[in-house]
């Protein structure tokens, strides 16, 4: 029975993942989010062979992996995707996912916890890739490539309990807290007459909101829900769709032009989806929260 439930859940989740990728490809980035990478080629090659080649051998190895280490940048201020655990280590869905990818690729994963706004510029120098609940955007694609997307998100609006803010119009002229350099920050910048306060740590923004120093915080759905629970009774998280915010997709950022690494990561990601690991990480880190 438990097994059947697990299998059903896995089926539903992988369906929703596929839908997520599909709709993202249509809506925001037709050429790139899910289809631009060489994943299609890889899949085609794999299916013509008798047995699928493991991720480790799926493509010419990227030079980023030559030392046997994948250096990963994250910003561990974004629960449940990344946070610092009780042992002081970066942990969360993204961290578990990239470690599982590293295992498939036969490399050690080293996680570097840094500011979100520094991630993109560090890719290809200080770090090989970044996993940080990072939304695929056209602007970022000028500097980095992205893996296939692995999660579908939307910005939420966190409000003080009892706030009357309910529509996009209501946000005009308000004091808005965001995490520096995020898509929430970009949205806030476009809101007429709004004053944006940029924080390095999202939790500090929510803290200021709870203390009456802000009118709202704009941040991704899942962290918004974690913060709503953490500041229970003080704040409420509202779906950004109500404010006209568009769906977003998370992907791993990769050095521009490193198609070998993109191939390897995409193949490993697909294997983790196919073998159920991905869904069990979703249950463990996202649905439990
Ligand atoms: N998804 C948002 C972005 O990419 C926020 C990510 C984050 O704060 N870690 O900008």
Image (cartoon, rainbow, N blue to C red):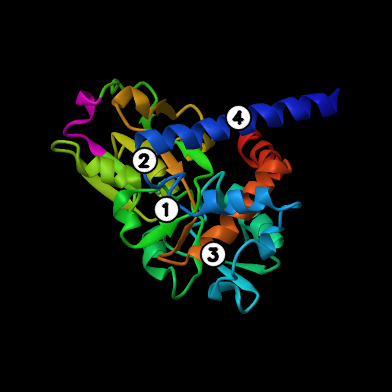
Q: CA distance from mark 4 to mark 2?
A: 20 Å
- Please give the residue where the numbered disc 3 appears in the rendered image: 261
Going from the N terminus, do you reach mark 4 or mark 2 first? 4
Residue 97 visible within the image: no
Q: Which residues are magenta?
A: 168-175
Going from the N terminus, do you reach mark 2 or mark 1 first? 2
Nearest the eye: 69 or 229: 69
Going from the N terminus, do you reach mark 3 or mark 1 first? 1
Q: CA distance from mark 2 to mark 1?
A: 32 Å
Nearer the observer: mark 2 or 1; the answer is: 2
Q: Residue furthest right?
A: 1
Q: CA distance from mark 3 to mark 4?
A: 26 Å
Mark 1 surroundings: few (<14), some (14-19) or many (≥20) residues within 10 A: some
- Please identify the quadrant where the N terminus is shown: top right
Q: Position of residue 191 (x, y in %)?
A: 19, 37
- Please give the residue where the numbered disc 2 appears in the rendered image: 30
């Amino acid at each position: 029975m438990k097994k059947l439930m697990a299998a059903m859940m896995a089926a539903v989740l992988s369906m929703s993942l596929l839908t997520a990728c599909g709709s993202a490809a249509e809506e925001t980035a037709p050429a790139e989010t899910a289809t631009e990478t060489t994943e299609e080629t890889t899949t085609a090659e794999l299916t013509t062979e008798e047995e699928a080649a493991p991720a480790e051998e799926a493509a010419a190895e990227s030079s980023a992996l030559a030392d046997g280490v994948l250096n990963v940048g994250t910003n561990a201020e974004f629960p449940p995707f990344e946070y610092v655990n009780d042992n002081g280590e970066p942990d969360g869905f993204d961290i578990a996912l990239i470690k599982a990818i590293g295992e498939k690729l036969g490399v050690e994963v080293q996680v570097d916890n840094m500011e979100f706004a520094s991630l993109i510029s560090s890719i290809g120098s200080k770090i090989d890739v970044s996993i940080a609940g990072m939304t695929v955007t056209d602007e970022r694609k000028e500097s980095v490539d992205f893996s296939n997307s692995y999660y579908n998100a939307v910005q939420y609006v966190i409000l003080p309990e009892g706030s009357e803010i309910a529509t996009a119009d209501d946000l005009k002229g308000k004091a808005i807290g965001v995490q520096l350099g995020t898509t929430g920050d970009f949205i806030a910048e476009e809101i007429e007459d709004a004053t944006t306060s940029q924080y390095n740590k999202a939790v500090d923004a929510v803290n200021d909101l709870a203390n009456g120093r802000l009118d709202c915080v704009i941040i991704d759905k899942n962290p918004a829900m974690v913060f709503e629970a953490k500041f229970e009774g003080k704040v409420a998280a509202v779906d950004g769709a109500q404010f006209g915010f568009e769906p977003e997709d998370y992907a791993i950022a990769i050095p521009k032009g490193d198609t070998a690494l993109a191939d390897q990561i995409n193949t490993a990601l697909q294997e983790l989806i196919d073998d159920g690991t991905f869904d069990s990480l979703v249950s463990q880190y996202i649905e439990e929260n």
